[in-house]
Amino acid sequence: MNIREFVLSLDLPNDGTMRVDCPSCNSKNTLSISNDDGVILYHCYKLRCNAKGAVHQGLTAHEIYNKIHKQNAEYNDEATELWVVPEYVVKPTADHGLVTKFRDQWNLHDAELLYDVKDKRAVFPIRENGRLIDATGRSLDGGVPKWFRYTGNAVVYTACQGGSNGRVVIVEDAISAYTICSTWQNVTGMAILGTSLSVKHMEHIQNYDKIIVALDPDASHKNLQYRREIVSWTGIDTIAMRLQDDLKYQVEEDIKSLQDLCRVGR
């Protein structure tokens, strides 16, 4: 089966995205695929692999109906958005070199990102039940603060590829949260947007059946503290990890330690 046949065989729905093993170079989880209005784009991020291209498939009548229905629903719900994106926060293009460098540095090619032109920040939108409620922005030029909340309506940023398998890894920031979801499909990366846990945090955390607290080494004292608080509030199986480095650096020892913990049944 050639790469084009392989991509078509996945039957990716309109607006869908996925990361899979590349059949061209056999690298694990490096082939990114998206379906944008019937145009299926694929690209392997492995160096020296040339697997990339587009397959023009078109939309079915059913998909066109669903797209129009979704657009109408989004339009009717516009007034309920808690964060109205300001005009200086835009969808990044190839001209925004700082964002491109940021994506490449942290392997965020599939992450939803906007760009704050005014403050030069990579912006991670935060949604709740499909509704845009907040965003967290990372300075790209050394600006202060390093991380910025746009509304304060959200208490967590989560990222998960595919449906949740009940595992959640609590981390320091949005980059580390995305590292979790891109490394283990169905595992949720959750960044706590603050310095302490609250009732609102517990409302999000209690939706999982196994919790792993994996904060940066310089905040390692909070791992045990968070674990005690989470178990006290929720009674859910919770593990505090000691990391060698921030998870977004993907130190091999840290990744191996998390591997079994993220697997269902362990």
Image (tube, rainbow, N blue to C red):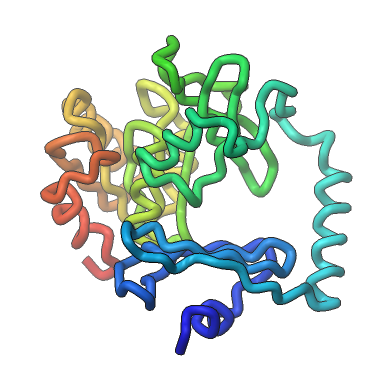
**Horizontal and vertical percent for residue 193?**
44, 28
Write the residue at 23% across / 45% down. Answer: 250
When the figure is inspected, residue 36 is found, relative to residue 99, above or below; the finding is: below
When the figure is inspected, residue 58 is found, relative to residue 116, above or below; the finding is: below
Count of numbered badges drawn on the protein: 0
Write the residue at 41% across / 69% down. Answer: 20
**Residue sitting farthest toward the bottom:** 1
In this view, the residue in front, 42 or 125, is 42
Q: Quick one: quadrant of the N terminus?
A: bottom left
- The answer to whether any part of residue 200 appears in the image is no
For this view, does 40 lie left or right of residue 206?
Answer: right
For this view, does 259 lie left or right of residue 208?
Answer: left
**Horizontal and vertical percent for residue 91?**
65, 36
**Horizontal and vertical percent for residue 66?**
81, 67
**Residue sitting farthest toward the top:** 144
When the figure is inspected, residue 69 is found, relative to residue 100, above or below; the finding is: below
For this view, does 122 lie left or right of residue 178?
Answer: right
Give the quarter of the image for residue 176.
top left
In this view, the residue in front, 140 or 148, is 140
**Horizontal and vertical percent for residue 52?**
49, 65
Write the residue at 17% across / 35% down. Answer: 245
Write the residue at 18% across / 33% down. Answer: 224
Give the quarter of the image for residue 242.
top left
Q: Quick one: quadrant of the C terminus?
A: bottom left
- The answer to whether any part of residue 237 appears in the image is yes
